[in-house]
Image (cartoon, rainbow, N blue to C red):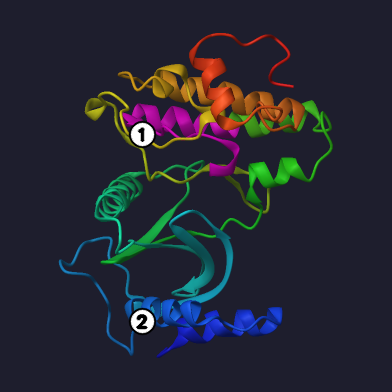
Amino acid sequence: MKNLYLFKEISNHVKSGRRLSLGEYKRAISWSKYLVSSGAAIKGEEEEEWSADMSKLFIGSKFASGRHSRIYRGIYKHMDVAIKVVSQPEEDEDLAVLLEQHFTSEVALLFRLRHPNIITFVGACKKPPVFCIITEYMAGGSLRNYLHHQGPHSLPLQLVLKLALDIARGMQYLHSQGVLHRDLKSENLLLDEDMCVKVADFGISCLESQTGSSKGFTGTYRWMAPEMIKEKRHTKKVDVYSFAIVLWELLTGLTPFHNMTPEQAAFAVSHKVLKQNLLY
């Protein structure tokens, strides 16, 4: 597996017909040295129950990315998996600490959660400045992407109800475990080949007993409850609010507040100046 990650990164660019820049090449090498094993298991500074044997992980093509993460398709012990790789920025110490906290929280929660409508955790690797979380691969992609490829108001009511019930069951289980998701949105709801929905992305989730104010919270404005936007103390009701927005998405196929910027949507929600047609 030596240099497998670097080979994959370079080969993807070759197939696209674009050459790697010097910065991209150095970045590929930098990440590869943390993710590639010559046969031994890479565990991290302290071996954990959730630690993955990286010598058995094969990393394929990237299919999604965020501000600080990349998500790849891969194989782990003959299983199709999704691999989220997070890299801490060297130039921003506060952000690096925050990303590590999100990683620790997400792994701790995923490790204990088991439900048909919750993404299945496979393993993780902690080797700063790179973190890796491995979950089952969901072939259907995100609910947001699925809705984007459908026409507005085109989903049959029976399918809307099925998807809504899947989400509700997953969220009911989370709340029964005392967990708040805090970033429930269609992008974090994944579909398998049978159109079963699973709740994913627990990077900013927490136990209800640990909630305080949401100062410094980084959620998604279009789905965020007013108390979160105002950085007030919150409860599981913030997930109920976000669930209602997702239900609206299912019925319309549209992006919430699509005619407003995220900041405008946040202002309208938090100051209660919404009119009935602002979602449309």
Of 22 and 277, which appears nearest the observer? 22
Q: Secondary structure at mark 1?
A: loop
Residue 139 in picture, x, y percent from top left: 64, 58
Disc marking residue 217: 1
| Residue drawn at 32 percent across, 44 percent down | 109
Residue 272 figure quarter: top right
Q: Amino acid at mark 2?
A: Ser
Of 112 and 11, which appears nearest the observer? 11
Q: Amino acid at mark 1?
A: Phe
| Residue drawn at 53 percent across, 43 percent down | 188
Q: Is residue 169 above or below residue 35?
A: above
Report the magenta residues as a range. 166-188
Of 163 and 88, which appears nearest the observer? 88
Magenta residues, dominant SS class: helix
| Residue 152 in view (yes/no) | yes
Residue 73 in picture, x, y percent from top left: 55, 68
| Residue drawn at 74 percent across, 22 percent down | 280
47 left or right of 171 in image? left
Residue 52 in picture, x, y percent from top left: 32, 69
